Image (spheres, coloured by chain):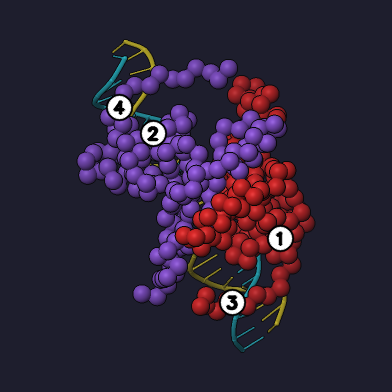
Chain colours: A purple, B red, C cyan, D yellow
Amino acid sequence: MTGMERARKHSSKRDAILRVIQSTVSHPGAQWVYERLKSAIPDLSLGTVYRNIKLFQEERQVISVGVVNGEERFDGQTAPHPHFVCSGCGKIIDLPCPEDEAVRGMAAAVQQDFVIDYRKTVFYGLCGECTEEPTRLVP
Amino acid sequence: MTGMERARKHSSKRDAILRVIQSTVSHPGAQWVYERLKSAIPDLSLGTVYRNIKLFQEERQVISVGVVNGEERFDGQTAPHPHFVCSGCGKIIDLPCPEDEAVRGMAAAVQQDFVIDYRKTVFYGLCGECTEEPTRLVP
DNA sequence: TTTCCTGCAAACGATTTGCAGGAAA
DNA sequence: TTTCCTGCAAATCGTTTGCAGGAAA
């Protein structure tokens, strides 16, 4: 058994946080979500953002794309799909190509040995802008 | 141009650190490498481990598998291959299935839009031991 | 010599957490 | 009421960094 989950009460801040994450394609970190909301919710605290994101992850309403430059980045679209991370600017982009047969097949193979509940495919490289102008060292 | 790389001098500690990472399948973190070496190299410091791992990553002698429980984990086998991460115990396992056509095909597609220099496929779930005895909450 | 490497310890920065007051059930 | 939620600020903890001495070239 998984144990007794604590009852969940309604919270408008929680709703707002989830809404922000779900309504952007920027794959934000906690700080970004906080800054995005603090003008509308002046008494919001960063700790609350962290606490709620953790809840969303447990409920699989939000997934982690990974840690980029030391900061964990999230995605409100939880269906498995590949991501591209730009090593130059840290941008994260949803890849147009569907997470195909291939990876699903792989998942099937792996499931013979392990219980899988989540998978991730991430490509790293430079985005269009950073290819032209890599990381701008000297202004 | 990428700029002038600084000359690299020989260092027995650096060699030892790389050797440890390359000769284990545990996908260790910096701390593990440090503890593994400190009996043989009593004056080794954790900072040196971090500094050298960063060098190895730049030279692609070591890659990052990702952050598990807040700690970055590394792999001395740099050819792209999928990993399994156990959410129960944090163990990382190389998956037997070759990183197949599928993902390579996906990479090819992505390369039309981006410069890719690295890719990652990770499955999350519970390993055999943790399936039977999940995370042992109460001893 | 000059340049790189390292121990040490302080600094950093993202995330977590204890506490006390407030809101939801 | 009771339980959950949150602001606040302190605490954590993995990782980075400045400095001075030592090793490699």
Q: Which mark is residue A11?
A: 4
Q: Nearer the viewer, residue D1 or A49?
A: A49
Callouts 3 and 1 on one subunit: yes
Callouts 2 and 1 on one subunit: no
Q: Residues within 10 Å of mark 1 (few under 14, many from 20)?
A: some
Q: Which residue is mark 3?
A: B6
Q: Are dots 4 and 2 in contact, CB under 8 Å?
A: yes
- Amino acid type, label 2: Asn
Q: Which residue is mark 1?
A: B18
Residue at coordinates 73% horizontally, 43% vertically from top-left?
Answer: B96
- Amino acid type, label 1: Leu
What percent of the width, then of the height, locates residue B33?
Answer: 69, 52
Q: Chain of mark 1?
A: B
Q: Chain of mark 3?
A: B
Residue at coordinates 73% horizontally, 56% vertically from top-left?
Answer: B22
| Secondary-structure class at tag 1 | helix
In space, the residues marked 4 and 3 are separated at their CA atoms by 54 Å
Q: Are dots 3 and 2 in contact, CB under 8 Å?
A: no
- Amino acid type, label 4: Ser
Q: Which residue is mark 2?
A: A52
Q: Residues within 10 Å of mark 4 (few under 14, many from 20)?
A: few
* A2 on left or right of A10: right
- Amino acid type, label 3: Arg
In space, the residues marked 4 and 2 are separated at their CA atoms by 10 Å
Q: Quadrant of the C terminus of chain B?
A: top right
* A131 on left or right of A100: left
What percent of the width, then of the height, locates residue B38?
Answer: 72, 54
| Secondary-structure class at tag 2 | helix
